[in-house]
Image: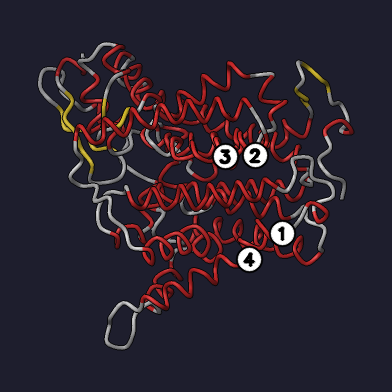
Amino acid sequence: MNALNVEDLPGAVKRDGLYLNSYCFLFFCAFVLFSFFKLPAPMIEGRFWAEEGTVFFKDLMTRSFVGAIVYEYRGTVQLLTAIPVWVATRAPLWVAPYILTYFWFAIVCIVFFQLYDWAKRTNLTFLSFLLMLVAWMFIPATYEVWASAVNVQWICSLSALLILLMDRERLSSHIRLVSFWIGLCGFTGVPSCMLAPVFITRAIVDRSKPHGLFGLILSLSSIVQLVMILKSGVPDRHFSFHVSDLLVATSVQTIMVPLFGVKPMNHIMISMFDVQGNYAEWRAVFFSLTCFIPIFYLAFGLNTKRFPNTIAGDSNAIYIVTSWLLVSFLNIIGSLGEFSMLLAPGAGRYFFFGASCFCLLLGFATTAKPQIVRAAATISLALIASVGISQRFFGHWPAQFISGPSWQRQIQNCPSDEPCLIGIWPDGWKFVLPPAALK
């Protein structure tokens, strides 16, 4: 099968250094359709998700635009969440959830085009990119961050990674735009900030000024975010960890769950305990290292000769795996709640980045020279895609993410002269709309 070599595609047109072609349009249409297929209710009716309504919407109703920019939540600045929520508070009430849902969709569309650009530069085949795209869209970790402005920080971290994987020549031609975007990502939560050392490392290794500049921007935003976290104090973040916990949570949630689904995870975790019910740390470490052996092989064991058609070079795999482990470990250390909560589907946001890296690495491996590596990567992507789609229809855990109370019906029944209690997604979350918002 021919590689996605954009110059050879029929109807390809070069504009400002970017190639626009029918394959891109075809994949984008598939992406939009799969988005509606995955979560039709939020895409059709819009929704408020959790803190979007109970915290952001309620607080930003009385703030100015500048107040929204400097708004702090759990000790961090959340620019790309606070700004669209502020806009939603100024819009007609029935439109508000659409603004949040489709603002998120605009951000994730940016990531789609970044993925497609990466696929072209990495010379993925048509089938490989299609499998990778579907696999990525249906991994369990995506459900919590899908169609939700409050979780856009996790989408931003993937966008930052895809910028990291770009070559310096391409970045140099769009340096101002990318710098602005990296700045927005850096001041939208902390996940993107975690990539600062990887950007700096690539800047030194490749002598790349753009990567150095982006690393500096993320470093500065990291300092600001850290100061605010320390200043505000977040009692429900423990900032403690155990090596075995880091390894188990990362290997289970970013490798095993995408491959085999959420339910088998319970059986895997049972195997981590001995007959007396005590946690067997050696089993956890052994299991985790076994999961990562093929990952390390793909990152460090395959040299450039084994990726003959890859424009981007084999450093892609090294940066993907390094970022994967760094961000996943830091997310676990700074997570909310107890460690046991990290093994539930509702903690998918902390592992969205790592699971996305897994899909990227498998996509990259489909360009390897050894046939067995290409076959294993293709089969793995097909397995992730099929398991993800089957869970969408037959799994019980996605229910909280794909259905919820209707915003429009509730506000129609609200009295205009007294506060109104509104239910939002997921079920059980509610907040009170003041009479002024209903007029």
Q: Amino acid at mark 2?
A: Val
Which label was assigned to residue 205?
2
- Amino acid under disc 1: Thr
Considering depth in this image, is 255 or 409 the residue closer to the camera? 255
- Residue at the farthest bottom position: 275
**Viewer-nearest residue: 403 or 250:** 250
| Residue 300 position (above or below residue 278) | above
Task: Look at discs 4 and 3 and give the one toward the viewer.
Answer: 3
**Callout 1 touching callout 2 (CB < 8 Å):** no
**Mark 4–mark 3 distance (CA, rounded to whole Å):** 24 Å
The residue indicated by pointer 1 is 378
The residue singled out by tag 3 in the image is 201
Please tell me how crowded label 4 is: few (under 14), some (14-19), or many (20+) other residues with Cα within 10 Å.
few
**Where is 333 relative to 60, above or below?**
below
Residue marked by disc 4: 294
Tell me which numbered mark, 1 or 4, is placed earlier along the sequence. Answer: 4
The Cα–Cα distance between marks 2 and 3, rounded to whole angstroms, is 6 Å
Q: Nearer the viewer, mark 2 or mark 4?
A: 2
